[in-house]
Image (cartoon, grey):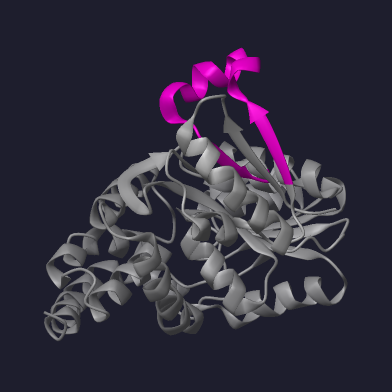
Amino acid sequence: MSNTITVISKPGCHLCETLVPELEDIAKKNSATLEKVNLLEHPELQAKYAELIPVVLVDGIEVGHLVVAREQVESALVPITGAKSAAFFDLDNTVIRGSSLWHLGRGLVKHKFITAETVRQFFWKQFKFVTIGKEHIGDMDFIRRQSLKIIAGREVRELETKGALIAREMLVPKVFRQSLELAKAHLEKGDDVWIVTASPRRLAMLLSRELGFTGAIGSEAEIVGGKYTGEMIGNVMHGAEKAVAIRQLSERRGYDLTQCTAYSDSANDLPLLQAVGTAVVINGDRKLRAHARKAGWAIKDFRRSRHARKYGISTLSLGLVPIFNKLFRRNR
């Protein structure tokens, strides 16, 4: 079994003719399979992609269209291990403490990619996430839209380089030790381990590599000509989208979902948890914990300040404001 790179093109497409040899070289060097699809032979693809060709997918997930950079394709490739089961970990508040986008923003400020004032706008949304311990779909959409605007027009290569540093400096220290131990136990028994998140797939992939996981599934930011456009490809990887994604991944890689395990903190991930044979709640919100008790799922809590969050929100909020201001004043 190998990764499959799919290129959707049509005769007479100059961009396609330029891209295909590059994809052939990538496939050869990475022991991947290159699949060429003629757009004109598939009416459903014509309706979806129209003037966007060439379109490139890796293992069924779109990674770019029109002008596709080599690094876009190579970064989407993941090793095929032959494992028959996998563990799927939600990212925010499950693998790491808090929001990955928030930590990304702090890292981008540190490395002079964006200003502290830009990140400041995320504060109250992130504060709600951390103190209440649950995701709000409206907040997720707000953060996603704002984060995409931040990177619009920036080079993919530039952000990839900074992203690797940020994953190491900002995300790894926020990893729950117990969650990492659970993931390593799966790897030791031969399971694949995937991060499944609404955050950008590229960011999750960088963290996945740092932690030694198999790969990551996440939301896809649109890239044209090697630059981010500020738009998204498809839907945010949230709620039911996660269940769809792991089913598609399992079909491609031969996983038996009844033998797989999923971990999450949010009731929004019930479709993900219900799609596998074993569901485990980590740092769960109230709704998810209630559902887990009825379903007989394991419940784990790795947070040190659960009760402080539950009963001390007002006092904590007053104390965090000056801390937040001081933290980002250093990076102006």
State the residue at coordinates (16%, 63%).
Answer: 118
Of 53 and 210, which appears nearest the observer? 53
68 up-or-down from 44: above or below: below
Spot the residue most to the top: 43
Residue 99 seen in the figure: no
What is the quadrant of residue 74 in the picture? bottom right
Q: Is residue 315 left or right of residue 126?
A: left
**Residue 4 in picture, x, y percent from top left:** 72, 47
**Residue 113 in picture, x, y percent from top left:** 24, 71
Q: Is residue 44 left or right of residue 85?
A: left
Per the rendered image, the range of residues in magenta is 34-59
Residue 50 part of the magenta segment:
yes
State the residue at coordinates (42%, 52%).
Answer: 135
Residue 153 seen in the figure: yes
State the residue at coordinates (21%, 77%).
Answer: 112
**Residue 193 in picture, x, y percent from top left:** 72, 65
